[in-house]
Amino acid sequence: MEILLTTVFVLGYAAIAFEHSTNVNKAAIALLTGVLCWTVYMLSSASPDEVNAQLLEHFGDLSGILFFLLSAMVIVELVDAHNGFQLITNRIKTTSPRKLLWLVGFITFFLSSALDNLTTTIVMISLLRKIVHNHEDRLLFAGIIVIAANAGGAWTPIGDVTTTMLWIGNQITTGGIIKHVFLPSLACLLVPLLYLSWRIKIQPLNLHPAHEEKPNNTTASERNTVFMLGVGGLLFVPIFKTLTHLPPYMGILLVLGVLWTVTEFIHHKKNDEDKGRFTVVRALQRVDAASVLFFLGILVAISALQSAGLLTHLAEWLSKTIGDQDTIVVTIGLLSAIIDNVPLVAAAMGMYPLEQFPTDHSFWLMLAYCAGTGGSCLIIGSAAGVAAMGMEKIDFFWYFKRISLLALLGYFAGVAVYLLQEQIF
């Protein structure tokens, strides 16, 4: 069973990577892979009821992630429909690709620490579309956004799903992760930015002039209101989670409900044709549903591997084969580029009890960094990468050739900074 399950996953993964050769949409392959993985697991199980219970439990977690993703995309589309992003794009005047790279990188890095890497990627790529006209130029910036979003999300307990897991499980504290992981995460971003500034030659960018924004019959007051509610609402989600202890998707559903109500009120006096362009219904039509289904398929396939115990066996094999604590954590981080970091961290949390590695132990803090940033090495290695891939139609091999090495250099630079600061302090 384990061999067949692994084979199905690997073949599905390869088909996704070769999407442009097979001409089959990656979302279709991901869905097929996810269902086939669970089919193999079910047919090899002696207890179908137990497998169904596991599937139901996983879908409870997956639905929260998917509703979060869908709600965030609708909020961004609503802000975009009202030309709300003009507040930012009109203030970006530089046509220098190097200056814009640094600006985009640092905005993403710090925004991701306050929101999360997935939402930040959606917001920043939506902004990027308003600034950079040429798609080929935009791809490079999208790659930096993925690296910056994952690096920014690794040094706070609310910036990444895995850091939130470790925080809730009492493996890390807020002060501990910020103190120990901020500098490694910063190094993870700085190295790719420095390399690109030094080596990459790009012509001056073709930016969207502000006056070319399409008229949409919204006033400045309406644009500002929707922008403030949308972006402010996204920033409010982690606060809502802290105050209520409800999962993040409940917070973002609250924000969507409020924004929906406000936009209905703002446009209620307009005729149906004018009002229709600013509704949630129209925003849902513009959302890339294929990206959501791709994300679903990948997570379903990973959950099958997790339920079958393959990821736990992998973690145990690493412990027996490698032995060294730091090397194991670095390896887990690199594996997260292939296998989702959530089940890998979950497996590590199950393998190593707090009695062995207490709260804020170096193992957990380094794991937070490595699992959070290692996924940047491949486009489908993180939620941020999957979102960027869907929104900008990024080819797997384009990312592998142009961005993966930069992400890998940044990853190991952060590891070096982490180990160095541990030696010093």
Image: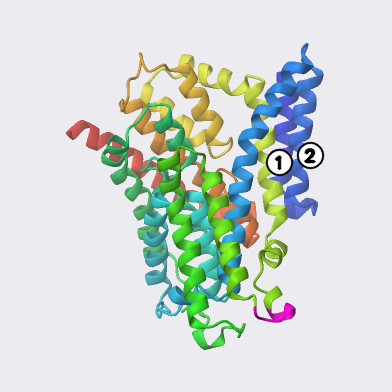
Question: How far separated are the C-alphas under marks 1 and 2?
Answer: 7 Å
Q: Where is residue 241 in the image (x, y as percent from the top left)?
A: 45, 42
Does the stretch in magenta take in 273?
yes
- Tell me, yes or no, whether the two marked residues, 1 and 2, touch with CB atoms within 8 Å: yes
Residue 415 vs 251, above or below: the answer is above
Magenta residue span: 269-274
Residue 340 vs residue 409: left or right?
A: right
Query: Which quadrant, please, contains the C terminus?
Result: top left
Q: What residue lies at 38% left-to-right and 26% top-to-bottom?
A: 170
Q: Hey, what amino acid is under mark 1? A: Gly
Figure quadrant of residue 326: top left
Q: Position of residue 331 (x, y in %)?
A: 46, 30
Q: Position of residue 394 (x, y in %)?
A: 62, 58
Does the stretch in magenta take in 406?
no
Q: Which residue lies furthest to the bottom in this view?
A: 211
Residue 310 vs residue 112: left or right?
A: right
Q: What residue lies at 58% left-to-right and 51% top-to-bottom?
A: 253
The tag on residue 32 is 2
Q: Describe the element under mark 2 as helix, strand or loop.
A: helix
Q: Hey, what amino acid is under mark 2? A: Leu
Residue 249 vs residue 59: left or right?
A: left
Query: Which quadrant, please, contains the N terminus?
Result: top right
Figure quadrant of residue 78: bottom right
The tag on residue 161 is none
Residue 47 appearing in the image: yes
Q: Return the disc, 1 or 2, that comes first in the chain's sequence.
A: 2
The tag on residue 297 is 1
